[in-house]
Amino acid sequence: MALPNETLSAIFQELSPSSLAVIARVSTRFNGVAERLLYSSVYITDTLRETSPLPYRTLWWCEAMRRRAHLFDSARKLHIRWQVDSPSCPPSPYLVNACEQLASVVRLLVPLESLDLFLGPANLVPGHHRPPLHAVERVIRDCRFSQLRSCALGAEGAKGAQPYTGTLIAFLASLTHLRHLRLSDAHAALDVPAGALQHLSSFRGSADAAASLLPGRPVQYLSLIGEDSDVNRENLPRMTRTTVPLRYLDLSAMSVRPLLLRNVSTYLPTVESLRVKLALRHTLHYAFSGIRILAGLSSVLNAFPHLSFLDLSPTGIDGVGRADSLEELALCREWSRACPSLRRIIFPSSTEWILDNDAGWTLIQS
């Protein structure tokens, strides 16, 4: 007795893409089920080289999708990344055409729930094309994804590169169910209509973009990119105007000085989880060396009344050296006195400590 397609699909979902590719060659029926699964979640990475300057994997996928129009309605995840093998390699002018070919397929994937596009050097191609658009905008400009929940967009940036235009704003405003947004190269404020993105719960991007997007939206998780000097007394207060308390703050993409942490504690006292890469060239306590220079964090942590998780692992151990457990335990106790809500700490060495039920700090063995 033949199994129904629904049962086959449930079984095949447990298989790897390479196994699905083998299964697809067994029979016409297996091919139909396996193909739908293979093309429902697509992850492509293209490395652009001087000898191979175009994203051929992406272009081959586009060609394959054009031959399989019946699979458009099964698309759920599309993650495409273009990267260069050498920064000195100039971008091919034909990358603009590659963006257009990608756009011709992406706009047909209406059921998409997750979209991640990083187009590498495509936005560095000299701008002789009209209308002037960011490379990402060339792909998304006619897209309407009513089911999209997660979206990440970006490309390599450089001075003089084409900035985003109103095309990005219009695209974001159309995403009525979007919950997670990452914009890696949108450095300016985004004038998204107030009624748009009403389900947005997490954002990763520049400080100015965050300050324009967070007000009036239920964002609980914020990850900032750029320099710590980009976060200032003008944009930081606007980040506090979310409709729910901001609970998770990730500053691991920038080198953070103590002054910024103090400002953050002033404007964002609701933070419960803080991930940070400290700028150790600005030592926190001149009287100590090694890991003990972090003792100066006590006065900063004191201003976070709800902080329960502190992750310093992005800092790395080069600036403080590898600490022993006694030094880390001493810091746990010191910080806990300054910030009684602390329950979990990860040090630059990546060692993790938790506060147990007996109010003692315990090292988690990896």
Image: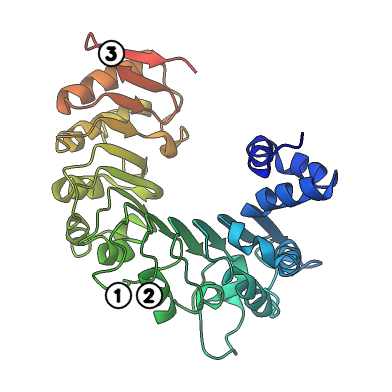
The quadrant where residue 123 appears:
bottom right
Q: Residues within 10 Å of mark 1 (few under 14, many from 20)?
A: some
User: Depth check: 106 or 51 in front?
Assistant: 106
**Do the residues bearing badges 1 and 2 touch, measured as CB atoms within 8 Å?**
yes
On the picture, is 150 further left or further right than 98?
left
Is residue 76 placed above or below 285 in the rendered structure?
Answer: below
Type of residue at label 2? Ile
| Mark 1, residue position | 191
Residue drawn 57% across the image and 86% down it:
127
The quadrant where residue 103 appears:
bottom right
User: Depth check: 309 or 287 in front?
Assistant: 309
Q: Earlier in the sequence, mark 1 or mark 3?
A: 1
| Mark 3, residue position | 356
Type of residue at label 3? Asp
Whole-percent x and y of residue 258?
25, 44
Q: Which mark is residue 169?
A: 2
Whole-percent x and y of residue 296?
23, 33
Whole-percent x and y of residue 21?
78, 46
| Residue, far top | 358
Type of residue at label 1? Asp
Q: Residues within 10 Å of mark 2 (few under 14, many from 20)?
A: some
Whole-percent x and y of residue 189?
31, 71
| Residue, far front | 1
Circle 2 sits in a helix, a strand or a loop, which is it? helix
Colouring scheme, one of rainbow, by chain, secondary structure, one colour: rainbow
User: Depth check: 105 or 152 in front?
Assistant: 105
In front: mark 1 or mark 3? Answer: 1
On the picture, is 241 further left or further right than 10?
left
The alpha-carbon separation of the residues under discs 3 and 2 comes to: 47 Å
> Visible in this render: residue 116?
yes
Residue drawn 14% across the image and 35% down it:
305
The alpha-carbon separation of the residues under discs 1 and 2 comes to: 7 Å
